[in-house]
Image: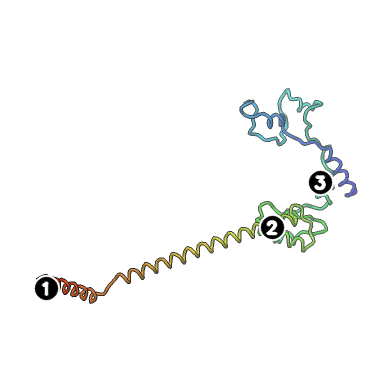
C-alpha cells in the first residue's frame, strides 16, 4: 500500500475512532466516594476489558461503549509513524541524533531530559535538519526566560549575602577598635591614680 494513501486513510479512521474507556467510566467521574461507595473511584478511566457475566459491553450490545478490535487499527506500513510518515525516534543524547537519518526519522526529546540539555539537543537537531515533534521555538523561549529569571534571582541573593558579610566584618572591626580604645596602659593608670591622690590632698589642705 502507498504510504501517502495509508496516512490519509489513517487520518480518516482516527476522526471517527471512539475513545476506549473502562466500563462505567462516565459514572465514575460524575459520582464520588460519598454518593456511591460500591463504585471504585480510585481506578481511572483507562480501558480495561469488561468481565462481568451480565455486562452489556462484554456482549457488544448496541448503545454500550465500544471495545477495541483489529478493525480500528492503522495500516501496518504506517503504524507507529508520525503524521508525515517518518519513524519516531526518542532522543536523550547527541549520539542518538547522529545515529538517526533526517530523511527517514523525526525526533522526540525524551521526558527524562532536563531543560538545559533539551535546548542543546534542539539546537543540534535543527542544525542536522530534523523535524522535532514535541519541541518548538515558543517552548525554547519560555525555557530561556526561566533561566534568565533564575540567574537574576541568584545574582540578587549573592549580592545580598556579600553585603551582609561586609556589614558583619565592619561591625566586628568597630568593636575591636572600641575595645582597643577602652584599654589603657598601666603607666597611664598609675598617672591617673597619682593625680586623684593629689586632688584629694589639695582638698584636705584647703579645708584646714
Query: Is 196 left, or right, of 160 in this rendering?
Result: left
- The residue under label 3 is 79
Quadrant where the C terminus lies? bottom left
- The residue under label 2 is 118
In the rendered image of this protein, does residue 58 appear above or below residue 135? above
Query: Is 74 left, or right, of 166 in this rendering?
Result: right
Q: Earlier in the sequence, mark 3 or mark 1?
A: 3
What residue do we see at 83% from left, 58% from top? Answer: 103
Secondary element type, mark 3: loop
In the rendered image of this protein, does residue 132 appear above or below residue 64? below
In the rendered image of this protein, does residue 3 appear above or below residue 69? below
Which of the pair 119/194 is nearer the observer? 194
Could you say where residue 25 lies in the image, as x and y percent from the top left? 71, 31
What residue do we see at 72% from left, 24% from top? Answer: 53
Dot label at residue 68: none
Q: Quadrant of residue 151?
A: bottom right
| Mark in front: 2 vs 3 | 2
How far apart marks 1 and 2 lie (CA) works out to: 97 Å
Q: Quadrant of residue 141?
A: bottom right
**Callout 2 crowding tier (Cα within 10 Å): few <14, some 14–19, many ≥20:** many
How far apart marks 3 and 1 lie (CA) works out to: 122 Å
- The residue under label 1 is 205
Amino acid at each position: 500500500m502507498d504510504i501517502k494513501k495509508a496516512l490519509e486513510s489513517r487520518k480518516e479512521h482516527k476522526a471517527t475512532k471512539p475513545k476506549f474507556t473502562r466500563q462505567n467510566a462516565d459514572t465514575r467521574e460524575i459520582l464520588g466516594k460519598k454518593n456511591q461507595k460500591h463504585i471504585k473511584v480510585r481506578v481511572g478511566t483507562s480501558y480495561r476489558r469488561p468481565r462481568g457475566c451480565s455486562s452489556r459491553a462484554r456482549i457488544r450490545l448496541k448503545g454500550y461503549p465500544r471495545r477495541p478490535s483489529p478493525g480500528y487499527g492503522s495500516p501496518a506500513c504506517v503504524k507507529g509513524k508520525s503524521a508525515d510518515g517518518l519513524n519516531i525516534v526518542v532522543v536523550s543524547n547527541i549520539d542518538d541524533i547522529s545515529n538517526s537519518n533526517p530523511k527517514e526519522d523525526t525526533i522526540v526529546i525524551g521526558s527524562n531530559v532536563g531543560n538545559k540539555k533539551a535546548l542543546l539537543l534542539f539546537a543540534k537537531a535543527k542544525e542536522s535538519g530534523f523535524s522535532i515533534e514535541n519541541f518548538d521555538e515558543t517552548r525554547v523561549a519560555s525555557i530561556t526566560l526561566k533561566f534568565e529569571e533564575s540567574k537574576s534571582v541568584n545574582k540578587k541573593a549573592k549580592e545580598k549575602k556579600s553585603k551582609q558579610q561586609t556589614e558583619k566584618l565592619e561591625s566586628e572591626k568597630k568593636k575591636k577598635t572600641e575595645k582597643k580604645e577602652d584599654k589603657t596602659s598601666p603607666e597611664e593608670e598609675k598617672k591617673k591614680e597619682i593625680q586623684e591622690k593629689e586632688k584629694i590632698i589639695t582638698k584636705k589642705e584647703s579645708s584646714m
